[in-house]
Image: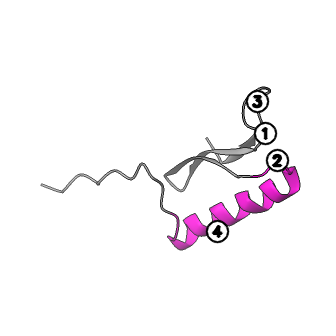
């Protein structure tokens, strides 16, 4: 599933979320803003960070060791 912006849920947080997978990197995080234009810019930055290898998700799992 490609990265996409998720609408804020009523009664919950007012902030947009980024959710999906890009270049085998799973992302599920808040943008920290209720502004859609700013959230779109943050999404672009997350994509750029993943492409450069600078993105670090909290759920990093070690890759299996070759046998």
Element type where label 2 sits in the image:
loop
Residue segment shown in magenta: 33-55
Q: Is 38 one of the magenta-colored residues?
A: yes
Which label sits on residue 34?
2
Within 10 Å of disc 2 (Cα), the crowding (few <14, some 14-19, many 20+) is some
* Residue found at x 34% / y 50%: 61
What type of secondary structure mainly makes up the magenta span? Answer: helix
Q: What number of labels is visible?
A: 4
Residue 7 falls in which quadrant of the image?
A: top right
Which label sits on residue 14?
1
Q: Are marks 3 and 4 in contact (CB under 8 Å)?
A: no
Give coordinates of residue 22: x percent, y percent. 58, 53
Q: Nearer the viewer, residue 23 or 18?
A: 18
- Look at mark 3 in the image and give the residue it sits on: 9
Which label sits on residue 38?
none
Nearer the N terminus, badge 3 or badge 4? Answer: 3
Q: Are marks 3 and 2 in contact (CB under 8 Å)?
A: no
Nearer the N terminus, badge 1 or badge 2? Answer: 1
Within 10 Å of disc 3 (Cα), the crowding (few <14, some 14-19, many 20+) is few
Q: CA distance from mark 3 to mark 2?
A: 11 Å
Give coordinates of residue 26: x percent, y percent. 51, 48
- Look at mark 4 in the image and give the residue it sits on: 48
Q: Are marks 1 and 2 in contact (CB under 8 Å)?
A: yes
Element type where label 4 sits in the image:
helix
Nearer the N terminus, badge 3 or badge 2? Answer: 3
Q: CA distance from mark 4 to mark 2?
A: 21 Å
């Amino acid at each position: 599933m490609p990265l996409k912006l998720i609408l804020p849920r009523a009664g919950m947080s007012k902030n947009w979320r980024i959710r999906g997978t890009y270049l085998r990197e799973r992302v599920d995080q808040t943008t920290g803003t209720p502004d859609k234009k700013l959230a779109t810019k943050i999404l672009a930055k997350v994509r750029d960070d993943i492409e450069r290898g600078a993105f670090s998700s909290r759920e990093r799992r070690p890759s299996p060791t070759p046998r």
